[in-house]
Image (cartoon, helix red, strand yellow):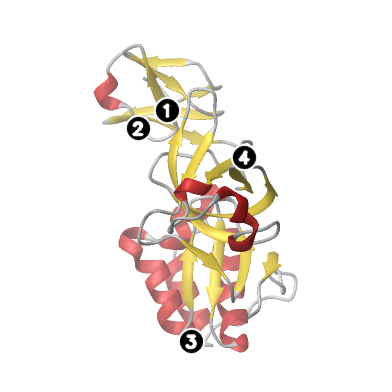
Amino acid sequence: MNKKVVVPGDFLSDDVQKAGDGTYVRDGKIYAKLYGVASDKGKVRVVPLSGLYIPSSGDIIIGTVKSVTFSNWILEIKSPYEGWLNYSEYPRRIDSSDMSKYLTVGDSVMVLVKELTPSMKVDLTMRNNRSMVIKNGILMEISPVKVPRVIGRGGSMISMLKKETNCNIFVGQNGVIWVTGKDKDVVKAVDAINVIENEANKQGLTERIGKLLKGELKEKKEEPESPDILNELLD
């Protein structure tokens, strides 16, 4: 397959063993799950051309409660689709009548994508050892397609960010990042992450960020000076 632009539902291959990111399998065939560029190099993949997050089973993401129904919390997950967290997927046994005591509108949580159904319903769960309610630090947003650059090859970039800023940093696959630490360290981390997003395609970025974090490199005035913060959650 030569690289080509595809839209959701386009047929890509009948070799289901090659299904990769940005695709789904139905009736023994691989189809595009999103608008992007399809390629076939060992795996059939679709790289998104837009910045929206397309959920995949197993993703760890950060969402914010936008409404509460009689049995589900509905989460904004920076996707074309809403996230559905059933009360039975909360990490402890609760009654549906008590849901708002545990999560209410505006609360942010780290959750796992349990399933993306054919009707594009995103089922979420907190029944794993990484999910939690976020009660401190800040949340910032980057384009989901830049998430791999912030993490780096083998986790190299995110490890350097944590070490040089003394912050705890979690990067959700949907592009929402949770940063905790001392105020000045959080600002340092957020500034560096903004540079990574803005210069993701440049050569030598890891070295540049390393120098920036060590104070060996000064940013130009025209570059972003403030983080793109979605929300501040303070104890």
Task: Name the amino acid type tagged 2.
Answer: Gly
Q: Secondary structure at mark 1?
A: strand
Q: Residues within 10 Å of mark 2 (few under 14, many from 20)?
A: some
Q: Nearer the viewer, mark 1 or mark 4?
A: 4
Q: Nearer the viewer, mark 3 or mark 1?
A: 1
Q: Secondary structure at mark 4?
A: loop
Counting from the top left corner in percent of width and height, residue 107 is at 64, 61
| Vertical comparison of 107 with 179: above or below | above
Residue 140 relative to residue 33: left or right: right
Q: Is residue 199 visible?
A: no
User: Residue 47 versus residue 72: which sits nearer the camera?
Assistant: 72
Label 4 – label 3 distance at C-alpha: 40 Å
Label 1 – label 2 distance at C-alpha: 6 Å
Q: Which residue is mark 1?
A: 23
Label 4 – label 2 distance at C-alpha: 23 Å
Counting from the top left corner in percent of width and height, residue 52 is at 61, 41
- Residue drawn at x 49%, y 39% is 123
- Residue drawn at x 62%, y 48% is 75
Q: Is residue 22 visible?
A: yes
| Vertical comparison of 116 with 112: above or below | above
3 or 1: tag closer to the N-terminus: 1
Q: Which residue is mark 2?
A: 20
Residue 125 relative to residue 222: left or right: left
Residue 82, numbered circle: 4
Q: Residues within 10 Å of mark 4 (few under 14, many from 20)?
A: some
Residue 214, numbered circle: 3
1 or 4: tag closer to the N-terminus: 1
Task: Name the amino acid type tagged 4.
Answer: Glu
- Residue drawn at x 40%, y 39% is 57
Find out whether the residues at labels 1 and 2 contact each other: C-beta distance under 8 Å. Answer: yes
